[in-house]
Amino acid sequence: MEKQGDSYIKEIERAKFHEERGKINCECYACEEQKKIRSEIIAKRKKIIADYEKEQKASEKNQSW
Ligand SMILES: [Zn+2]
């Protein structure tokens, strides 16, 4: 349990460290992975919003016709 806690804290510290470095274009593997994951999440969100708007427009059409 203690070991798990230690690694969890280390994980947070590392994340903080890389985030700070990320501000000045850190190019280590961990930061690149994070950027990739973030852009994937943003892309997914955009897709969900686009799909939702499409559905909204489709239902609006159905109502007005
Ligand atoms: Zn980094």
Image (tube, rainbow, N blue to C red):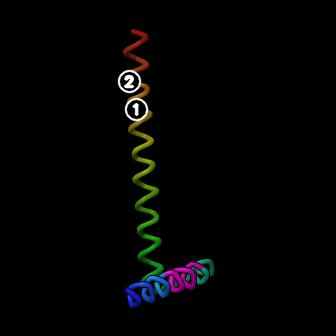
Name the residue located 39 percent from the left edge and 90 percent from the top edge.
3
Q: Quadrant of the N terminus?
A: bottom left
Residue under numbered circle 1? 54
Q: Quadrant of residue 22?
A: bottom right
In percent of width and height, residue 32 lies at 45, 78
- Above or below, 60 against 27 in this view is above
The kind of residue tagged 1 is Lys
What is the secondary structure assignment of the residue under circle 2?
A: helix
Instruction: Let me know if residue 1 is in the magenta part.
Output: no
Residue under numbered circle 2? 58
The kind of residue tagged 2 is Ala
Name the residue located 44 percent from the left edge and 33 percent from the top edge.
53
Cα separation between marks 2 and 1: 6 Å
Q: Quadrant of the C terminus?
A: top left
What is the secondary structure assignment of the residue under circle 1?
A: helix
Q: What stretch of residues is rendered in magenta?
A: 12-19
Q: Quadrant of residue 39?
A: bottom left
In percent of width and height, residue 50 lies at 43, 40
In percent of width and height, residue 60 lies at 43, 19
Q: Main secondary structure of the magenta part?
A: helix
In percent of width and height, residue 36 lies at 42, 70
Q: Are marks 2 and 1 in contact (CB under 8 Å)?
A: yes
Name the residue located 41 percent from the left edge and 67 percent from the top edge.
37
